[in-house]
Amino acid sequence: MIIQKSTAPRISEFDPENFSFGNMFTDHMVICEYEDGKWGEVKLMPYGPLPFTPAMMGVNYGQACFEGMKAYKDKDSQVFIFRPEKNFSRINKSASRLAMPEIPAEVFLEGLKALVDLDRDWIPYGEGNSLYIRPLIFATEEALKARISNKYMFAIVATPAKSYYSAPVSVKISDYYSRAANGGVGFAKAAGNYAASFYPTQLANEEGYEQIIWTDDSTHEYFEESGTMNVFVRINDTIYTPPTSEKILDGVTRDSFIQLANKRGIELKVEPISVKSVIEAHKNGTLKEIWGVGTAVVTTVFKAIGYQGEKLELPQLPLEESFALTLQKDLVDLQTNVAEDPFGWRVLVEKSI
Amino acid sequence: MIIQKSTAPRISEFDPENFSFGNMFTDHMVICEYEDGKWGEVKLMPYGPLPFTPAMMGVNYGQACFEGMKAYKDKDSQVFIFRPEKNFSRINKSASRLAMPEIPAEVFLEGLKALVDLDRDWIPYGEGNSLYIRPLIFATEEALKARISNKYMFAIVATPAKSYYSAPVSVKISDYYSRAANGGVGFAKAAGNYAASFYPTQLANEEGYEQIIWTDDSTHEYFEESGTMNVFVRINDTIYTPPTSEKILDGVTRDSFIQLANKRGIELKVEPISVKSVIEAHKNGTLKEIWGVGTAVVTTVFKAIGYQGEKLELPQLPLEESFALTLQKDLVDLQTNVAEDPFGWRVLVEKSI
């Protein structure tokens, strides 16, 4: 690995009490370039601009995919990342579906650990605070042909992130727009999936909903995801979540919630969730909770669902009654070294640079 | 418009007899940046790299769409572009669906004409030769939040293009993969649509097919597009092409073919094409031609279609019997000022820079 430390670090300008998520980047980034059929050397270097022309294939033909991860700092200043091998394996699944070269494990994992190690001072202390980490791969060849690119960049950039707390939101069950086709790229963290979701979400916002519960594009009868998150529904004391598929992202937080529910002995069924069953459960009072999970916010609890022009209110349960909030706390405590980690999910980032 | 001419033009290195399409760019490009809710001034400047970080939203969340156009030079060195208002209107439809700001007409059309005017020496003479022009819009804000970007770049780059002739190809009718969801972005020239098509196309290549005929994702019973082109089928002496929809691109070449067929009195029906009807027509000998149309190649004739493991050969008709080749010739003659233009499609690019 080539290490080139910043000669003009900005860390002294970073106020952990007062920053906005996602716009302020740490002092360094990782890059690794693919050319002539192979990945080059990993480079840890100052965060900043690189030269690209508007003919870059990544912005013309959309070969681009990413991951979202977090690093946490405990009260003793130890730094941890969470299940990094899951993100490593998933970025390669995304890359394969987009006909991009897979990243070797050492490029991904060593690059990741080196960046988090070197920029560890950017990780804010305190409950729920973290460093949000963005690995991505994108096509960099300059060419105006709709074909697979011959050049790529793998990069990792990072930004400090605040408390995971997010207020309960209202979500609209989609009856027209959809995010994934059968035989498409819905399961991949493909850049284009996000762009496609913005306009329908904007329309939902105008109707008073923060997010969309995406349904299957053929019938709109089954839940797929919610916003950019996996979705969980609790009816009586059973949790349901749709099975992953070519249309549904295999979320790391989703998988962690499933295992944490099992550990607590909460009944959880991985099976298709029909819109009809949710609406019926709301009518007969057995619908207790619906929530989304993802790396960025961990959990977003839904306070209302919109369906066929009606806004159906959901009960707001306190922590001790809520499966969503209980599992969220279990997960965050494990991630931040407040609780034991019987799963071996937490990975310590050693000081070595 | 700000005009900054190249001080190191590369035109003298350009050999119109010996170049490869898509990798060699003309001396200039157009850029225009969007910020604080408005587009800035159009800039015609030397082609080259601009500074972007890997946190650029365009490669993270895929807000990016493009157009493909051509400029032609006649024997008297007059330069023409073709139906530019169609591409202008379509890039804004794509932009809207991706929640990106629309481009004003003067930015798009004046930028386009200025670039073609200034780089007119890059347009090769000769039948079928042209300059391929790529207008595109992509998100440029640096932010790691899955939301609509606040900054964009509109750019136009160009590359010399050779003869439109392309050899007949074999195509596979898709029975698993698909390019568009109901309620999705299939009608838009969204960057992500192309990335999603590469892997299925690669698999088809391995089975001996150059392209895929995309079918509807719910049933795979109806034709949508072929490769990156609109598709036409001729049964007996009637041409069929699917109606445009939210899943099918409203192609400029497609529309031109329809109008040219009408002008010749060839029967053409815009209606759904079922896979079953095409296979039946092949069996009973009434399937005469299938072809794809698009700006880059104008027409690609299909010599075989793959369906359920069988490769069905198609007759190869000479120009005087082929509707595909006849309409292609009509179009190219019109585009290159060899024939009259009763439609008013050809637009002369005046010398003014």
Image (cartoon, coloured by chain):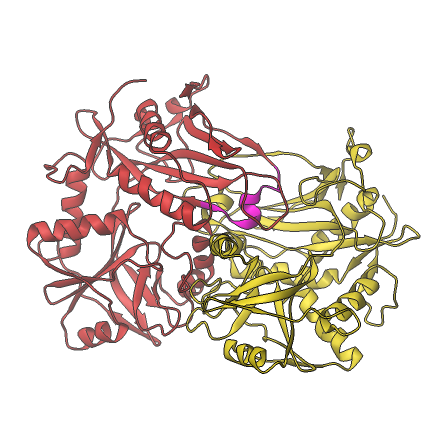
Chain colours: A yellow, B red
State which quarter of the image contains the C terminus of chain B: top left
Query: Residue at position x 23%, y 58% from top?
Result: B291
Q: How many marks?
A: 0
Residue B192 screen position, x and y as percent: 47, 53
In this view, B116 is above or below A111? above
State which quarter of the image contains the N terminus of chain B: top left
Residue B22: in sight, yes or no?
yes
Residue A118 screen position, x and y as percent: 81, 43
Answer with the quarter of the image where residue A292 lies.
bottom right
In the image, is residue B55 part of the stretch drawn in magenta?
yes
In the image, is residue A145 part of the stretch drawn in magenta?
no
- Using residue B138 as the reference point, say whether residue A255 is left or right of it: right
Given the current orientation, which residue lies at the most extreme left position?
Answer: B265
Residue B312 screen position, x and y as percent: 26, 72
In this view, B179 is above or below B155? below
Query: Residue at position x 53%, y 33% from top?
Result: B36
- Using residue A135 as the reference point, say whether residue B111 is left or right of it: left
Given the current orientation, which residue lies at the most extreme right position?
Answer: A76
- Using residue A347 as the reference point, say whether residue B116 is left or right of it: left
Query: Residue at position x 82%, y 33% from top?
Result: A12
For the magenta stretch, what is the residue range?
A: B53-64
In this view, B12 is above or below B280? above
- Using residue A176 as the reference point, say whether residue A279 is left or right of it: right
Q: Nearer the viewer, residue A325 or B216?
A: A325
Answer with the quarter of the image where residue A94 lies.
bottom right
Residue A139: in sight, yes or no?
no
Residue A32 screen position, x and y as percent: 66, 45
